[in-house]
Amino acid sequence: MAEKPAIKIGYMKITDHLILGVTDLKLKKGMEKFEHCTLSPVLKNGWNEVADALSTKSLDGALILAPTAMDLFKSGVDIKLLLFAHKAGSILVKSKKANIEKIEDFAGKTVLIPYQLSVHNMLFHKLLSEKGLKPGRSTEKGIDVTLEVVAPFQMPEALEYDEEGEIGGFIVAEPFGSLVIAKGYGEEFYLSKDLWPKHPCCVFVVRNDIIKKYPEAIQEICNSFVRSGLAIDAQPDPASIIGGDFLSQDRDVIFKVLTDPPDRILTSELFPIIKDLDTIQKYMMDEMKIMTSLIDLNKFIDTSFATKAGAK
């Protein structure tokens, strides 16, 4: 029998990527067994690292921001989107030092985002635009709120050491928002699910050559991810213990993210919704001007794996 390929999947230490942590643990504990591959999770610290690793083929697949994945596809990286990694699950936190009561108070402040091509950037843009405020980079003219890209894990510290209250807050995947709130530096301003219910955020993509070479292996991973997602939503208590280990975070913080409120993050509905992804790319092109052209989502998304895995 041929040696089983080790499928390298990039991820970050965010609650959005918990399905990978649960699957990894099930395999390590022998609760699940893969016939066609071994799973090799590869930790990355920032979104540019994930994107670069997919471009240079040092990863076989990744859990990655949906708009970033679309942009990679557009730039010629031959990847397919197979599953959503979750729905919702992000938070807009305001700094306690910044005296922010309403959206308009973000004017003149800096707000941290995890990446330009992120749903976080889009949701915050929408929120500000509705109040007639213009977000942008410090180099741009006529902006009201300065956006700064900071890796998620560095955001809590940035807020903690901002003595002057120049940083209004940040919008990011959990658990970093809840962490800052628990430490007493920030307060919840909005949950992303309240800005766009059940919005997509991170997706599971795999390089097309890997899919063609090892279709059974990729199916096996998708099957397991779907099961892991159902387990997280059904049993947040054990999931938060796994999450605490996998994400190197306090399990109480993870438990809060998974349960309070119950629909704060959803991992039981991983079937890719083309219409939602189209909403993202159109908004980023028409309103934000950070995408220059649209991609053919039907060429980018392969729902056959999700269908076989019984994804909802």
Image (cartoon, rainbow, N blue to C red):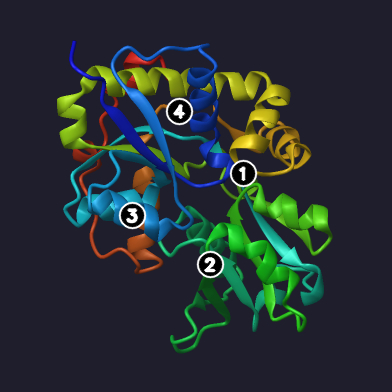
What residue sits 40% from the left and 66% below the top? 287
Dot 4 crowding, Cα within 10 Å, few <14, some 14–19, many 20+: many
Q: Which residue is mark 1?
A: 193
Residue at position x 49%, y 88% from top? 142
On-image quarter of the N terminus: top left
- Residue, x 51% and y 12% (percent of image)? 30
Q: Which residue is mark 2?
A: 150
x%, y% of residue 312? 46, 20
Q: Which one is earlier in the sequence, the residue at label 4 or at label 2?
A: 2
Q: CA distance from mark 2 to mark 3?
A: 15 Å
In 3D space, how far apart are the residues under numbered discs 1 and 2 (Cα atoms)?
Answer: 22 Å
Mark pair 4, 2: CA separation: 27 Å
The image shows residue 226 at horizontal and vertical percentages of 46, 21
Q: According to the image, label 3 marks what residue?
A: 51
Q: Are marks 2 and 3 in contact (CB under 8 Å)?
A: no
**Element assignment for label 3:** helix
Q: Position of residue 306 (x, y in %)?
A: 35, 22
Q: Which label's residue is closer to the chain start, 1 or 2?
A: 2
- For mark 1, give the secondary structure: helix
